[in-house]
């Protein structure tokens, strides 16, 4: 029976990677995933410092709310150095500093001709957060542990929210390097580890303040469940189902039709212990169902992270 479960799990991950990564209707800033994934779900070691380098790429398009005859296209690449510090056995503090490149273009839908474009690069919104472990239990004899944690944090308005095109006009809000607003978030996560299987579930809500251009990003709620199976000591496969619902954005109180709604995706991935305390983690978030407002598309989101732990 156990061998059958192993085979089924590996087969599901393989099939998930083979799923057609077609563009689906989705909001232009949908982001699935645990906002404090870098903190992990294992018991912190007091005094430990970890560093990570997170890499992410995504694509999206949306009809322009300013002029519905035009469609915006966006390719985004982000590299984020992350510092994780554990001052106590119940707390992880995380600081992420994103560097983002965006390739944005505005095209006439009827003719396909380019109307405008920009390629901003620079600092994004710095993320500062913490994961408080409210409950932790372990049984060494059964190789089992579980934990319940509270996540809380905020993205800060450090990214440029006034990027201009070649003519000196401000480009679309979602093509900006930063939101221009504070983005507090709060959530819960639970993890159960029973070697060689790990299971986890999370949910979180993110809010935003109104930025200087009177733009308000709609409140978003994310949730997910994932399983991890260790093939052998240094290597594990992961598979999750994640989703996000967001309310419509508004500009000066006016609803932005081509924003907001729900998106769900399957997330196959892997974890590799390269040497000692050096880890490589990767996954791809593949949307399979969306029910959103307006006309938008989003492709798969690719994540690849390198992490190293220092010991005091």
Image (cartoon, rainbow, N blue to C red):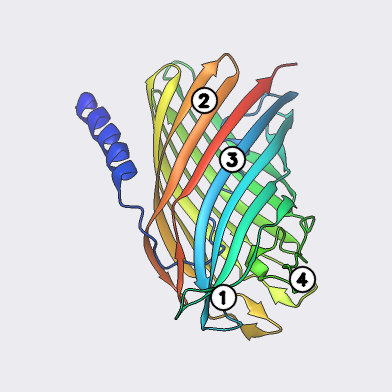
Residue shown at the point (39%, 64%) measured from the top left = 24
Residue that badge 1 annotates: 248
Residue shown at the point (45%, 75%) measured from the top left = 295
Quarter the N terminus occupies:
top left
How far apart in space, not on screen, are marks 2 and 3 (Cα)? 32 Å
How far apart in space, not on screen, are marks 4 and 1 (Cα)? 15 Å
How far apart in space, not on screen, are marks 4 and 2 (Cα)? 45 Å
Q: Of tags 1 and 2, which is closer to the observer? A: 1
Q: Of tags 2 and 3, which is closer to the observer? A: 3
Say which label, 2 or 3, has the lower sequence index: 3
Q: Position of residue 263 (x, y in %)?
A: 44, 62
Residue that badge 4 annotates: 211
How far apart in space, not on screen, are marks 1 and 3 (Cα)? 28 Å
Is 37 on the left-hand or right-hand side of 15?
right
- Give the secondary structure at mark 4: loop
Residue that badge 2 annotates: 138
């Amino acid at each position: 029976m156990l061998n059958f479960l192993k085979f089924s799990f590996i087969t599901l991950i393989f099939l998930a990677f083979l799923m057609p990564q077609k563009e689906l209707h989705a909001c232009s800033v949908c982001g699935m995933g645990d906002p404090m994934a870098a903190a992990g779900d294992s018991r912190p070691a007091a005094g430990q410092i970890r560093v990570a380098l997170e890499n992410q790429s995504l694509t999206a398009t949306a009809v322009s709310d300013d002029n519905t005859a035009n469609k915006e296209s966006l390719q985004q690449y982000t590299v984020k150095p992350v510092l994780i510090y554990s001052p106590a056995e119940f707390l992880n503090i995380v600081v992420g500093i994103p560097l983002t490149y965006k390739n944005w273009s505005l095209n006439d839908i009827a003719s396909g001709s380019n109307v405008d474009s920009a390629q901003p690069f620079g600092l994004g919104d710095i993320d500062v957060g913490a994961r408080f472990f409210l409950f932790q239990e372990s049984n060494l004899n059964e190789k089992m542990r579980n934990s319940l944690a509270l996540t809380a944090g905020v993205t800060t308005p450090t990214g440029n929210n006034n990027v201009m095109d070649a003519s000196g006009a401000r480009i679309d809000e979602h093509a900006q390097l930063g939101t221009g607003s504070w983005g507090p978030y709060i959530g819960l996560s639970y993890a159960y580890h029973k070697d060689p299987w790990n299971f986890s579930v999370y949910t979180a809500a993110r809010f935003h303040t109104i930025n200087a251009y009177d733009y308000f990003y709609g409140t978003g709620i994310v949730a997910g469940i994932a399983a991890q199976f260790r093939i052998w000591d240094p290597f594990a496969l992961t598979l999750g189902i994640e989703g996000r619902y967001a309310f419509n954005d508004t500009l000066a109180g006016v609803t932005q039709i081509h924003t907001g709604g729900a998106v769900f995706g399957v997330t196959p991935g892997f974890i590799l212990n390269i040497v000692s305390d050096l880890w490589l983690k990767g996954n791809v978030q593949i949307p399979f169902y969306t029910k959103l407002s307006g006309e938008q598309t989003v492709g798969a989101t690719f994540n690849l992270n390198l992490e190293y732990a220092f010991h005091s």
